[in-house]
Amino acid sequence: MIEVDIEGSAGNLPIRATFRSDSGVTALFGHSGAGKSTITKMIAGLLRPERGRIAINGETLFDTGKGMDQPVRMRRIGHVFQEARLFPHLTVKSNLAFARWAGRTIDRTRFDQVVELLGIESLLSRRPGTLSGGERQRVAIGRALLSSPRALVMDEPLASLDQGRKAEILPFLDRLCHEAKIPILYVSHALEEVARLADTLVVISRGETVACGPTAEIMTRLDLGAATGRHEAGSVLVGRVSAMDSHWSLSTIDVEGHEIEVPATGIEPGTEVRLRVRARDVSLALADVPGLSIRNRLPVTIEAITSETGPYAEILCRIGEQPLRVRLTRASVSDLGLAPGGQALALIKTIAIDRREIIGSGSA
Amino acid sequence: MITLTPAEWQALTLTLKVAATALAVALPVAVFAGYALARWRFPGHGLLNGVIHMPLVLPPVVTGYVLLILFGRTGPVGSILESTFGMTFAFRWTGAALAAGIMAFPLMVRPVRLAIEAVDPKLEEAAATLGLRRGIVLAIVTLPLALPGILAAGILGFAKAMGEFGATITFVSNIPGETRTLALAVYTAAQTPDGEVAAFRLTIISAAVAFGALIASEAVARRLSRRIRGT
């Protein structure tokens, strides 16, 4: 559990962060320069807030009321920095060995587990200067894990990597997030990473926490358009793989009793999955349309409509209990006479769902 | 190959002994001072910096004279050291080492300070987040990364200590076998009628030693910097 309630400043930017999360992975999400890194540095003890309280798993690390301020090394928050920060003069193995020593990780099998989890066995004898960006980040994560931290902070670990390297490291992050038994704070300005990894989402804008809650719920909050970014805005649906059609290379996912066809993922039927649907990839129809190529047609209830300036309108729908965010033109909303409480069909193109954004939760 | 006379051997071994002793004591202190100047902000930062650099700007004879007053047998520091530890500096080779160390000190602090300032504090931060103590971070991150600079400081200090003249002759005089280092021996030979050959031979010896040390340090520095680049 992570509890944060702090005020301070970073240069000209005032910081006011208040959030708590009980679950595994908490994402700090916001634009570049919104103050995310500053907040994590305050949590790690690298920067000092002016006032407030920080506690992890019930243990207070910082509290101006009680005059408490644990030094960085006592806080034991594993930190994965954007630029990896490996010790350049030491081999990968020595980098890990010093972390293990600092964390008093005596158990040899733990070392082997971490090395195996991150796939860095073959890198052990090399020096950081010879590693690729993705390899460096994996070693940095391993180093943080071996220091036996009480929480793990990952500050945009993928931001400096190109698309290929990101794809290489994301599966390791999936595994880590599912297997780690400590709270993870994941900082990112990329909605796709956040939707994929986080259970709790904290939205940061201009140094302040503007929203905090379960990822699926926060992602569909219409009032956070400016903070979450419009282009990538969307929702996360939770379902179960029900069938796999190898002839057409399609997987079927059952969401609240409705079927959604997606590009084949290779995930076993019966597995629970999360898939992200971008708001701009969803259309609404008042009745079923014959002769249309769109394969996914889901009955939804309209819950709220927010008209913004310009051409756009944000619509929040429900598929059963689950929220679905839709982005249309204001003109369409008007033409179709859409209103809260109304029924509609949500049309989602199968190929609009990126197979890399369909994540198994591991529980078959 | 020239064969050294007993007097030349004496001057050479004495010089090496004086320079090595000066280096062994002054370099660790210089590393500490360089670290303090690079990483700590405290009242009197500028003053300390100034005091450290005094021997560099004072005439060496003045430094030697101050040492003589302080560390002479009847001086305030010298008399205490002699009565409590039985240590004497005046007119002894230890005094020559003290003078050489003090003269070399400011030359060593500067490269050490620059080398430590060049170590990315972000790496030290990362080490702290792992739970490592400050002293350990210093030992496994900061100092190893600053090692090329510390080595350069050592070479510079050793060269300065070997060639120290003004403060040495003022403080401990020019006693054969005790305080007559190569530099003082060259001076003595040059003052002696018909001493040109002797002075020339001593000059060759000095140059050979200095050149050898430079080559050796160059080789070590290359290996170190390869390690630190991490390739």
Image (spheres, coloured by chain):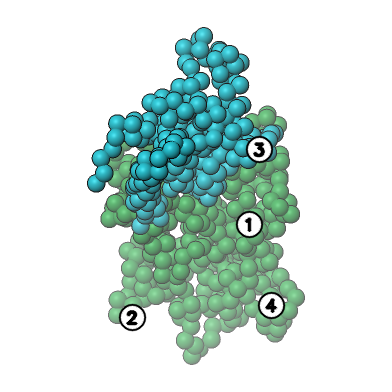
Chain colours: A green, B cyan
Q: Amino acid at mark 4?
A: Tyr
Q: Amino acid at mark 2?
A: Trp
Taking depth in this image into account, of A40 and B55 the one nearest to the observer is B55
Residue B122 position in % (x across, y down)? 53, 49
Disc 4 sits on a residue from what chain?
A
Taking depth in this image into account, of A289 and A231 the one nearest to the observer is A231
Q: Which residue is mark 2?
A: A248
Query: Looking at the image, which residue is at 48% across and 77% down?
Result: A352
Mark 1 closeness class: few <14, some 14–19, many ≥20 residues within 10 Å: many
Disc 3 sits on a residue from what chain?
B
Residue A265 position in % (x across, y down)? 36, 70
- Tag shown at residue B119: none
- Tag shown at residue B50: 3
Give the Cα separation between the discs numbered 2 and 3: 80 Å
Query: Looking at the image, which residue is at 71% across and 45% down?
Result: A8
Give the Cα separation between the discs numbered 2 and 4: 35 Å
Evaluate if marks 2 and 4 touch, with contact meaning CB atoms under 8 Å apart: no
Position of residue B223 relative to residue A297, above or below, is above
**Mark 1 or mark 2, which is nearer the start of the sequence?**
1
Q: Amino acid at mark 1?
A: Val
Evaluate if marks 1 and 3 touch, with contact meaning CB atoms under 8 Å apart: no
Evaluate if marks 2 and 1 touch, with contact meaning CB atoms under 8 Å apart: no
Label 3: state its secondary structure. helix
Same chain, labels 2 and 4: yes
Query: Residue A107 falls in which quadrant of the image?
Result: top left
Same chain, labels 2 and 3: no
Q: Which residue is mark 4?
A: A312
